[in-house]
Image: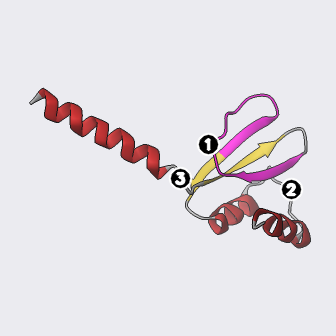
Amino acid sequence: MKRLIFAGSLLLASGTMSLADGLFWVVGNRATGKCNIVTSNPVINGDIWFGDGPYKSMADAKLARSTIRACPPVAPDEDKDKDEDSSD
């Protein structure tokens, strides 16, 4: 019975780690005064002063960034440039 519980907990732990792939977070960067979208769970310290997420898609993260009051508005051409850079 103990082996079955141990195997189940290992399976659950590995499943939750794989769920983190493909997720997005919105983070506030105090150094730049902007909010960035990142693909790893942010560590809140120093210049990173808040993190919000995770979101399942980039579109969801962009929508969330637009609704967070602490985030300055992003110009459409800046957002477009970032999308083009990330696809290279």
83 up-or-down from 28: above or below: below
Whichever of callouts 3 and 1 sits on the residue coming sooner in the sequence is: 3
* Mark seen at residue 41: 1
Q: Which residue is mark 3?
A: 21
Residue type marked 2: Pro
Q: What stretch of residues is rendered in magenta?
A: 33-51
Residue at image location 91% in from the left, 44% down from the top: 32
Residue type marked 3: Asp
Residue type marked 1: Asn
Query: Which of the image's four quarters has the N terminus?
Result: top left
Residue at image location 63% in from the left, 45% down from the top: 40
Query: Which of the image's four quarters has the C terminus?
Result: bottom right
* Mark seen at residue 72: 2
How far apart are the two marked residues, 2 and 1, measured between alpha carbons? 21 Å
Where residue 73 appears, x then y in whole percent?
Answer: 86, 62
Q: Nearer the viewer, mark 3 or mark 2?
A: 3
Q: Quadrant of residue 56?
A: bottom right
Relative to 40, 72 lies left or right: right
How far apart are the two marked residues, 3 and 2, measured between alpha carbons? 27 Å
Check if residue 37 falls in the magenta segment: yes
